Amino acid sequence: MDRNQKAEVVSALNAELAEVGVVVVTRNLGMTVAQSTVLRQKMREAGASYKVTKNRLARIALDGTSYTGLSTLLSGPVGLATSVDPVAAAKVAIDFAKTNDKLEIVGGAMGEVLLDAEGVKALASMPSLDELRAKLVGLIVAPATKLATVTQAPAAQLARVFNAYAEKEAA
C-alpha cells in the first residue's frame, strides 16, 4: 500500500469508529479465507462489520475517537468487529468463536468503556436492540388485548343466554 491508500484506510476506519456503538477486538489464529468470509457474512446479516487492518493503521484511526483505549489490545493478527447496535457484533463474534477455535476474543469497548473478553461475553448474552423493541411492543399491546377480551366477554355471555332462551322456547 502506498501512502495515499493508507490515508484512505485510516480515514474510512476513523469515520466508521465515530458512528458505531461497540468495537470487539478479535485475534485471528490462522483462520482460512473461507472461514473469514463466513464470519463476514454473519456479521453483515446481523448489521455489523468485520475488518482486518494493520495494527499501526488501526491505532492511528482510533485517535480522536472514544475508542482510543483499544490501542493496547492491538497486537498480533487482530480484527475489529463493529456495529451500531451494541450487542450485534459481540453476539456474532462470540457465537463464531464457539464453533471455531481459530478466533479468539481479546476484548472490546462500548464508547470509552473498555471490556475484557468476559465483558464482551456478558454483552453478547444481552438481548439485541430488535429483541428489546419486540418485548416493548408486546408489553404495550398486552393491556389493550386484555381489555378487548374483557369487554368482549360480557357480550358473548349475553348472546349465549339469549340463544339458550331461544332454544328453550323453540323446544
Image (cartoon, rainbow, N blue to C red):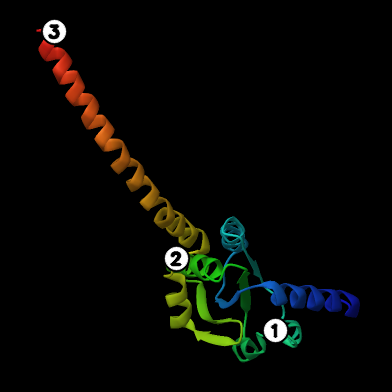
- Asked whether 53 or 139 is in front, the reply is 139
Q: Which residue is mark 3?
A: 170
Does the CB distance between marks 1 and 3 fall below 8 Å? no
The residue carrying pointer 2 sits among few (fewer than 14), some (14 to 19) or many (20 or more) residues within 10 Å by Cα, namely some
Can residue 75 be seen in the rendering of this structure? Answer: no
- Please state which amino acid type lies under the numbered disc 2: Pro
Q: Secondary structure at mark 3?
A: helix
Residue at image x 43%, y 55%? 140
Earlier residue among tags 2 and 3: 2
Quadrant into which the C terminus falls: top left
**Real-space Cα separation, disc 2 to disc 3, in angstroms:** 59 Å
**Real-space Cα separation, disc 1 to disc 3, in angstroms:** 89 Å
Relative height, residue 97 to residue 148 (above, below): below
Q: Secondary structure at mark 2?
A: loop
Q: Which residue is mark 2?
A: 127
- Asked whether 110 or 53 is in front, the reply is 110
The residue carrying pointer 3 sits among few (fewer than 14), some (14 to 19) or many (20 or more) residues within 10 Å by Cα, namely few
- Please state which amino acid type lies under the numbered disc 3: Ala
**Real-space Cα separation, disc 2 to disc 1, in angstroms:** 31 Å
Earlier residue among tags 1 and 3: 1
Residue at image x 42%, y 58%? 135
Spot occupied by residue 1 in the image (x, y as percentages of width and height): 84, 75
Residue at image x 62%, y 75%? 79
The residue carrying pointer 1 sits among few (fewer than 14), some (14 to 19) or many (20 or more) residues within 10 Å by Cα, namely some
Residue at image x 63%, y 75%? 80
Q: Which residue is mark 1?
A: 55
Location of residue 9 (image quadrant): bottom right
Instruction: Please name which of the two marks, 1 or 3, marks the residue nearer to the observer.
Output: 3
